[in-house]
Amino acid sequence: MTESDESASNATAEQAQAVSGAPAERDADLDAELDITLRVVLSAFAGGAAGLIAMIPILFVPPAFFGLFQATALVDVAELGRVLGLEPNLLLGTVVFVGGGAIALPLLFVVAGAFLPPQEPRATRGVTFATIMWTGFIIAFWPGEYAGVLFLGLSLAAHWVYGYVLGQVMQRFAYVPQHSV
């Protein structure tokens, strides 16, 4: 086979591959999803806010019903406000909690979620992400032994709901970024 015959054969194979939607086209699609755009970030913020709203009935209602809810945990989180000269209180603790769930965690998910399992569907990576974040939540908000099992179960379920909603909203309005490693 001559060099011109070989290059013609390769060109034909590349054209067939492009027409069939084979790897060259899929790689181009994947590269497009690597970009973290304003749309991705805004959809993450929306997903975080929606996730917080969805987790409230699980995270706060049953503990309040059983008299297990302790607002002091939110006030403890507000200790971060001392850096800015703010006195810790329930309102500041709530603002920190909501800011973390609607802004900080979604931004972290935009970057880290791209490396988490499962491969598909990408939206369920939010559940994996929320499970990891739950480990920090139980340390920060541990109510003590008297409610430990109930707290662990309800907070894990609430975080799974948060992660699922976060991932679904992002996938619906933009996409969950995918990075090749």
Image (spheres, rainbow, N blue to C red):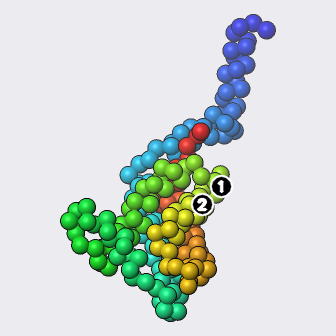
Residue 123: quadrant of the picture: bottom right
**Is any part of residue 103 visible from this angle?**
yes
Looking at the image, residue 103 sits to the left or right of residue 32; the answer is: left
Quadrant that contains the C terminus: top right
The answer to which of 29 and 60 lies nearer the viewer is: 60
Q: Are marks 2 and 1 in contact (CB under 8 Å)?
A: yes
Q: Position of residue 63 (x, y in %)?
A: 51, 86
Q: CA distance from mark 2 to mark 1?
A: 8 Å
Residue to which mark 1 is pinned: 118
The answer to which of 157 and 3 lies nearer the viewer is: 157
- The vertical placement of 13 against 174, above or below, is above
- Under mark 2, the amino acid is Thr
Question: Residue shown at 69%/33% (left/top)?
Answer: 17
Q: Position of residue 24 (x, y in %)?
A: 63, 34
Quadrant that contains the N terminus: top right
Q: Residues within 10 Å of mark 2 (few under 14, many from 20)?
A: many
Residue 152: quadrant of the picture: bottom right
Residue to which mark 2 is pinned: 128
Question: Residue shown at 56%/80% (left/top)?
Answer: 145
Question: Residue shown at 68%/37% (left/top)?
Answer: 22
Q: Nearer the viewer, mark 2 or mark 1?
A: 2
Question: Residue shown at 64%/53% (left/top)?
Answer: 117
Residue 40: quadrant of the picture: bottom left
Q: Residue furthest top?
A: 2
Q: Secondary structure at mark 2?
A: helix
Q: Residue furthest left?
A: 85
**Is any part of residue 168 visible from this angle?**
no
